[in-house]
Amino acid sequence: MNTATDLILAGALTAVWLAAGLLVETLPTARTARDLRRRTGFMSILVGAGAAVFVTVPVVTGLLPGASAAPAAALLPAVPAMIVLTTTRRRLSQIRRGAGAFATAPLAPLPPGLRAAAAHPLIAVPVQVTGLVTLVGLPIAAGVVTLPGSDAAGIGITVVGVAVVATAVRAALRHDRLSVPAVVRPTRMPRELTRAG
C-alpha cells in the first residue's frame, strides 16, 4: 500500500478545494467590480485545479504497484465536485462577465445585483461542501479508516452532513439578506389607455 502517495494525492485534493471554499466566501465582500472579476477568475482556476487533481488520482494510483486508498478517498467528494463543475462554474462565468461590463469604471462600487449573485447558494455551498468532504478522505487515504463498515467513517460522514446543512442554511440566509427585494406595486392605468379600452 502506497500510504505516502495516497496522502500526497488526498492532501493536494483537500488543499485545493479548501482554498476554493475560503475564496468563494469572499466573493460577496468584493468592493468593486474589478475586484469581483479578479476573485472569480481565481475561483475558476482553483476549480479547474481541483478537477485536474480528481483526474490525477486514478492515473497516478493506476501506474503505481500495490493497493491504493486514494481513489476511495477521492470518490467521496466527487458528487459535490460534479455540481461545482456543472452548475457553479457556469454561474462564476456569468458573474465574471457581468463584472467585466464595468471595466470602464474599475473603481465603481459593486452593484447590489452582482453582489447578490456572488452570494448565491449554488456558488458557495457546492464548493465548500466539496472542501469539507475532502477532509473525510484524509484518514481514508492514511489507512486509519477503512470503507465500508467503519464506525469512524460513519461518525465522520455524520459530522460532515451536519456541517453541510449548516453551510447551506447560512448561504441561503446570506443570499436572502443581500438580494435586492423586488416590490411590484400595482399602478393605475393612464387615462388614454382606459378610454381606448
Image (tube, rainbow, N blue to C red):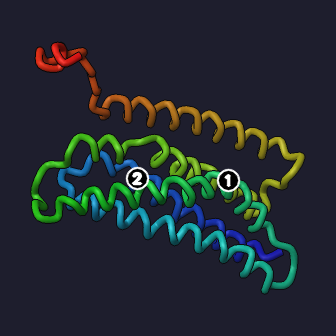
Amino acid, disc 2: Val
Position of residue 1 relative to residue 28, above or below, is below
Q: Residue at x 47, y 58 (%)?
A: 90
- Measured as percent of width and height from the top left, residue 149 is found at 89, 46
- Measured as percent of width and height from the top left, residue 113 is found at 27, 42
The quadrant in which residue 111 appears is top left
The quadrant in which residue 14 appears is bottom right
The quadrant in which residue 195 appears is top left
Q: Residue at x 28, y 27 (%)?
A: 182
Label 2: few (<14), some (14–19) or many (≥20) C-alpha neighbours in 10 Å? many
Position of residue 38 relative to residue 91, above or below, is below
Position of residue 16 relative to residue 65, above or below, is above
- Measured as percent of width and height from the top left, residue 159 is found at 66, 37
Instruction: Name the residue nearer the viewer: 126 or 195.
Output: 195
Amino acid, disc 1: Val
Mark sitting on residue 79: 1
Mark sitting on residue 24: 2
Q: Quadrant of the N terminus?
A: bottom right
Question: Which structural element holds mark 1?
Answer: helix
Q: What's the distance in space between the residues labelled 1 and 2, CA to CA?
A: 18 Å
Labels 1 and 2 touching (C-beta < 8 A) = no
